[in-house]
Amino acid sequence: MKKLALLLAALVILSVAASVSVAAADQYPNGCADCHKGDKSLAATVKGLAKHPPVAATADVNTCLKCHKAGSKLALNKQMHDSHQKAKVACDACHVTKDGKVTSALKGVK
Ligand code: HEC
Ligand code: HEC
Ligand code: HEC
């Protein structure tokens, strides 16, 4: 019995520690901008794409969405999903989560 109680106590402590660390650690609170900075900035990244119109050095995701509107021919979702899935980037690096679930809202969108 004593062993079982100890085991249960250990499990409770472990699960509390796990939920605390999940809630505390959003590695990418700003989405795109947390990975695409310096010589990997969004502007530098699109400069490397064939035939891409120039964007300001300070371009952020809001700049992209001005031309890449949801539902349009240039919509960003498919391209971003394919390339970042290859790069093993998790959904919640770009998307806001609510109640532990990924929403379609993007971090950093004004
Ligand atoms: C967790 C880090 C991370 C986040 C967040 C992230 N990216 Fe990336 N992105 C990468 C990596 C890694 C690559 C592939 C290697 C490279 O080109 O640096 C990449 C590649 C790209 C490319 C070139 C490939 C392509 O699809 O043409 C673009 C453009 C891009 N990202 C835009 C974005 C945008 C816009 C966002 C936010 C909506 C974003 N990224 C969020 C890490 C990230
Ligand atoms: C001024 C309008 C404009 C802005 C701002 C813009 N784009 Fe684009 N983007 C385009 C157009 C037009 C194309 C199609 C170019 C072509 O292939 O002919 C394109 C194509 C792309 C492609 C596909 C390229 C390929 O090789 O298939 C990606 C990825 C992309 N843009 C990402 C971005 C990101 C990320 C941003 C924000 C930093 C951004 N764009 C900002 C107009 C824009
Ligand atoms: C690199 C950043 C990035 C990652 C990683 C990412 N998304 Fe997205 N997602 C986007 C962008 C950009 C859009 C287009 C938003 C817009 O046009 O307003 C989008 C749109 C969406 C949408 C709404 C449109 C659609 O395609 O249905 C859903 C739902 C979605 N993402 C779910 C996911 C899920 C689930 C994952 C993980 C498997 C994921 N996303 C990973 C950037 C990302």
Image (spheres, rainbow, N blue to C red):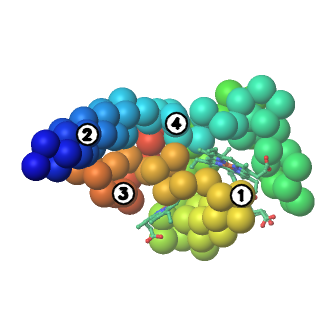
Question: Looking at the image, can residue 103 be seen?
Answer: yes
Relative to residue 29, is residue 19 drawn left or right? left
Residue displayed at 42% across by 33% down:
25
Q: Which residue is mark 3?
A: 102
Mark 1 vs ligand 1: CB below 8 Å: yes
Q: Which residue is mark 1?
A: 87
Residue displayed at 60% across by 33% down:
34
Q: Residue 38 placed where, x, y %?
A: 77, 26
The mark that comes first in sequence, 2 or 1, is: 2
The mark that comes first in sequence, 3 or 2, is: 2
Q: Which residue is mark 2?
A: 10
The mark that comes first in sequence, 3 or 1, is: 1
Closest to the observer: 76 or 17?
17
How dense is the environment of label 1, judged by Cα within 10 Å: few (below 14), some, or many (20 and up)? few
- The kind of residue tagged 1 is Ala
Q: Nearer the viewer, mark 3 or mark 2?
A: 2
Q: Which residue is mark 4?
A: 28
Closest to the observer: 21 or 72?
21
State the CA–CA distance, disc 2 to disc 1.
37 Å
- The kind of residue tagged 4 is Tyr
How dense is the environment of label 3, judged by Cα within 10 Å: few (below 14), some, or many (20 and up)? some
State the CA–CA distance, disc 3 to disc 2.
30 Å
Question: Looking at the image, can residue 66 be seen?
Answer: no
Q: Residue 6 placed where, x, y %?
A: 19, 40
